[in-house]
Image: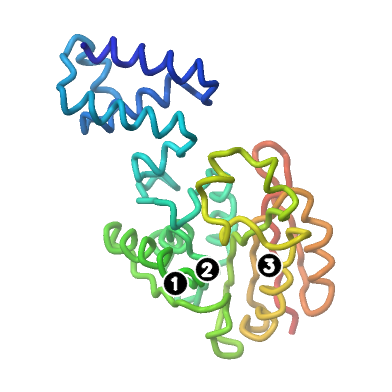
Amino acid sequence: MTLHTALLQGTQLLEEAVVAAPRLTAEVLLAHAIRRERVYLYAHPEEELSENGWIHYGRYLRERLDGKPTQYITKRQEFYGRDFRVGPAVLIPRPETEHLVEAAIAKIRPGSVVVDVGAGSGAIAITLALETDARVLATDISLKALAVASANASRLGARVGFVGCDLVSCFAASSVDVLVSNPPYVPLADHPALQREVRDWEPDVALFAGPSGVEMYQRIIGQAEGVVREGGWLLFELGYNSLGLVRDMLAQGWEDVEVRSDLAGLPRVLEARRAG
């Protein structure tokens, strides 16, 4: 079987199963199976697929048909132009979160102490460390997630301190200049309606906040009031329909509250400055 034929057959299987982006998914899985970049498939369409390559490709297709996200199969996801390793212990980084990173970069000054709450794969903290001159720290309650983030930092050459704790409970008073977080914000009631790739595979601790979906924002804000310095910044990625409730939580002790929208025009990032 040639690479071209294998690609066509994989695409057809994924189409019949109504898997999103079937052609692209087949390309990614086949390239991963033969340990090549996707462009290789088009440069060598008549190359025979080896028996080992077919075994791997068949397994990857079956996993994807069973709902396993492509990123967990390849163990890779690009974020802010860099290649991050991911697995079931961490949320898959989304392109929308790059808006949060860009907003944070605008607030960071040389030597700033920056804390990313809920490190996950480390995508936010590592990117901020590589794009700025800040001292970056990241927390997570999941030690498995911290292991993934630490490995990503080492591989990408980022100096980030990782701390296992509940939100920012381990930090001293008035010790943080910029606190940034993409917290869990999915209401528990939305669990059945989520895509199976998310519902059945991504970690619940990184997805669900509680009945309303804003519980984690409230907890972080409560702790941030003690650890963010006067004039320091708090930045959140916003969940669906969370803007009004989260903004109300910042009515006391915070000022210069602003909202940034994503490319679809949806409110994506909320930023606020700690009042003096």
User: Mark 2, mark 1: which one is toward the viewer?
Assistant: 2
Depth check: 188 or 186 in front?
188
- Which residue is denoted by mark 1 in the rendering? 136
Q: What's the residue type where badge 1 is placed?
A: Val
Q: What's the residue type where badge 3 is placed?
A: Met
**Badge 3: few (under 14), some or many (20 or more) residues near its Cα, within 10 Å?**
some
Q: Which mark is residue 116?
A: 2
Q: Residue at x 28, y 23 (%)?
A: 39
- Which residue is denoted by mark 3 in the rendering? 216
Question: How far separated are the C-alphas under marks 1 and 3?
Answer: 21 Å
Q: Upstream in the sequence, badge 2 or badge 1?
A: 2
Q: Residue at x 48, y 64 (%)?
A: 119
- Residue 37, above or below 116: above
Q: How many marks?
A: 3
Q: Position of residue 134 (x, y in %)?
A: 44, 71
Q: Is residue 37 left or right of residue 94?
A: left
Q: Position of residue 178 (x, y in %)?
A: 57, 72
**Badge 1: few (under 14), some or many (20 or more) residues near its Cα, within 10 Å?**
many
Secondary structure of the residue carrying numbered label 2? strand
Q: Quadrant of the C terminus?
A: bottom right
User: Mark 1, mark 3: which one is toward the viewer?
Assistant: 3
- Residue 23, above or below 141: above
User: Mark 3, mark 2: which one is toward the viewer?
Assistant: 3
Q: Position of residue 242 (x, y in %)?
A: 77, 55
Q: What's the residue type where badge 2 is placed?
A: Asp
Q: Upstream in the sequence, badge 3 or badge 2?
A: 2
Depth check: 195 or 91 in front?
195
Depth check: 121 or 103 in front?
121
